[in-house]
Image (tube, helix red, strand yellow):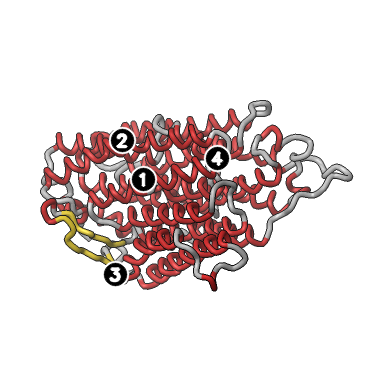
Amino acid sequence: MQFLLAFIVVGPLIGAAAALLPAPPGLKGKSPDQAVLRHGVTVTGAILAAAIVLALGFDHDQPSKMQATTDISWIPALDVRIHLGTDGISLPLLVLTALLTFLCALYSYFKMPEGPSPKAFVALLLVLEGGTLATFAVLDLLLFFLAFETVLIPMYFLIARWGGAGRRPAAWKFILYTLLGSVVMLLGLLLVGLQAGTFDMLALATDNGRGLTLSVQVLAVLAIGIGLAVKTPMWPLHSWLPDAHTAAPTVGSVLLAGVLLKMGTYGFVRIVLPIAPDGMQVFAPYLAAFAVVGVIYGSLACLALARPGSKGDLKRLIAYSSVGHMGFVLLGIATMTPTGVNGALFANIAHGLITGLLFFLAGAVKDRYGTADLDTLAGATGAALYGRAPRLGGLLAFAAVASLGLPGLAGFWGEMLALFGAFDPADGLSRPAFLTFMAIGGLGTLLTAAYVLVVVRRVCMGGPRPAGEARLADVQGYEFAAWTPLVALTVLAGLWPAVLLGLTDPAVQKLLSGGKA
């Protein structure tokens, strides 16, 4: 188990270095480009297999216990250690990251985005995977920061070199926002580590803030929270996200929405909640307020983009929907209750599955039509997607209704539990305020349903295919292979939520009780 987790973290980085080397003569296939793309599929497939074996070997009777741990001294002067481990909170995120990266590598093997050599593309994809997996596996504050930052450079280049129109400004906006947030976060992490005398996240979580004064906790939560909020992204620190998603290649959007946004909310759960609980309680009402404003803002922005004549972009609309969905995650965390935090963790996974699928589908629609402009897609030639590419239209409708939180699909449980958590927040938090936040969040679910149904009606429905007009290419074999796991897991998580909640709940209970099982 220790070797597996270490391999999951280090394997992508070794694979990235190998991708830049010349392919051995017997493995070149038809061309060097094909060889390096096949290398990406092989490495990410091996990491996914290791993550599945890790999940199967995980002691599901003790999900609150940190398992597969490695603890090696790295910088003795600062007591920084290479400390890895996984529990019921991080394990689902590790598997989700490995799955989405493999599906992106598989998709790229058949549909490589336009741009420079695939060598750099595959290497950056693997570095991105390694940094994300390390973020969810490390148990040292400084290592967490290093892993958190590792993903920024590969994502910047994926957007800037393989993106679409406006890619360079979008990439610069992404890197500047996230780097500025990270500088502030580093100050908060250093403050905690130096004041507590350790950077070990397990020791700090067990101490549960008792070694930190209230003023230190407040400053730490403010500094760390800003950095995490930018990555989440929380309104009003979200403005980099729509541009980045609109310009990014399909696989870049899938990974950005599916795993990178989760790093911010994971940091709130793993670091802020257990290490500085008193400081978190001070800021929890403000976090909840920003969260529900984000829910409403994201929904209204989507409605504006979906309106006829607005020239809204489908990818941009999905990006704004992420602001709303991540608002529910932040609301659940702000309640500081097991119900709310479990809902936040469930919504994290559901959003990764559903929004990852939505960006795959949006990319496929754009490839077929040559545009993601909603007015064009809803015009005379695009209104009947059901008639021109029925499987693609059906999948788009499925992902859309899953996104609005239809009962029986993954999107329902996380948002419902987050609202339940707001109904009865933790002791010391104002219940009337959180009841207000719950009501606003409930309104957000109605607005979400409104814009989702408008998009489905405009893009998928319409009159029959005009005579003599060619059918669109429907779902291809490689697309079916890349999308089917996301559809299946969306249904499984919706019908059997205990699979995920059984992992997260004991770990959350321990986390919120100060390390007591």
Marks 1 & 4, CB-CB < 8 Å contact = no
Which residue is disc 1 drawn over?
A: 265
Residue drawn at 33 percent across, 40 percent down:
228
Residue drawn at 41 percent across, 71 percent down:
53
In the image, 372: left or right of 226? right
* Label 4 residue SS: helix
Q: CA distance from mark 2 to mark 3?
A: 33 Å
Image position, residue 135 (x, y; %): 33, 53
Can residue 407 be seen here? The reply is yes
In the image, 271: left or right of 246? left
Mark 1 surroundings: few (<14), some (14-19) or many (≥20) residues within 10 A: many
Residue 318 is tagged as: 4
**In front of the other: label 1 or label 3?**
3
Which residue is disc 2 drawn over?
A: 226
Marks 2 & 1, CB-CB < 8 Å contact = no
Residue drawn at 38 percent across, 59 percent down:
13
Q: Earlier in the sequence, mark 2 or mark 4?
A: 2
Residue at the right extreme of this rendering: 467
Quadrant where the C terminus lies?
bottom left
Quadrant where the N terminus lies?
bottom left
Which is more toward the observer, 365 or 463? Answer: 365
- The three-letter amino acid code for the residue at tag 1 is Thr
* Label 1 residue SS: helix
Which is more toward the observer, 177 or 302? Answer: 177
